[in-house]
Amino acid sequence: MKAKEIRELSVNDLRERIEVERTNLAQMKMNHAISPLEDSSKLKKARKDIARMLTILSEMENQDKK
């Protein structure tokens, strides 16, 4: 997910999306431990997407406080 797409979401939608992505990442990790994924780079991409969302969420929250 691109930063531009993330910034279009509301704060509540972004929080929900982060939780969904964290759940998906945990599921992918579990599946990868049992039988390796065909494309293990998906784990790295998912972690980076979550980090990107968390960064933008904190920016939005800091903007609201000012």
Image (cartoon, rainbow, N blue to C red):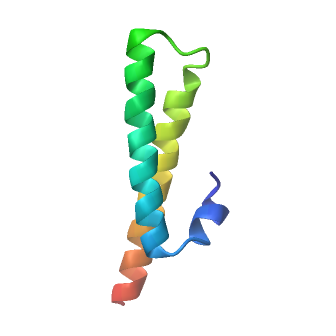
Expressed as whole percent of the image width and height from the top left, the position of residue 32 reads 44, 17
The quadrant in which residue 65 appears is bottom left
Figure label count: 0
Residue at the limit of the structure toward the left, as seen here = 65
Query: In this orientation, does residue 55 appear?
Result: no
* Image: 15 above or below 2: below
Q: Is residue 15 left or right of residue 52?
A: left
Q: Residue at 47% x, 57% y: name it.
A: 17
Q: Position of residue 33 (x, y in %)?
A: 38, 14
- Place of residue 53 in the rendered image (x, y in percent of width and height, measured from the top left): 48, 57
Task: Look at the image and tell me whether residue 3 can be seen.
Answer: yes
Q: Is residue 21 left or right of residue 7?
A: left
- Taking 40 as reference, is 64 left or right? left
- Quadrant where the C terminus lies? bottom left
Q: Which residue appears at 54% of the width and 20% of the height?
A: 40
In the rendered image, the vertical position of residue 39 relative to residue 44, given as above or below: above
Residue found 43% across the figure and 67% down from its top: 57
x 39%, y 42%: residue: 23
Q: Is residue 28 above or below residue 33?
A: below
Nearest the camera: 51 or 38? Answer: 38
Residue 16 x %, y %? 42, 61
Vertical order, 51 against 64 (above or below): above
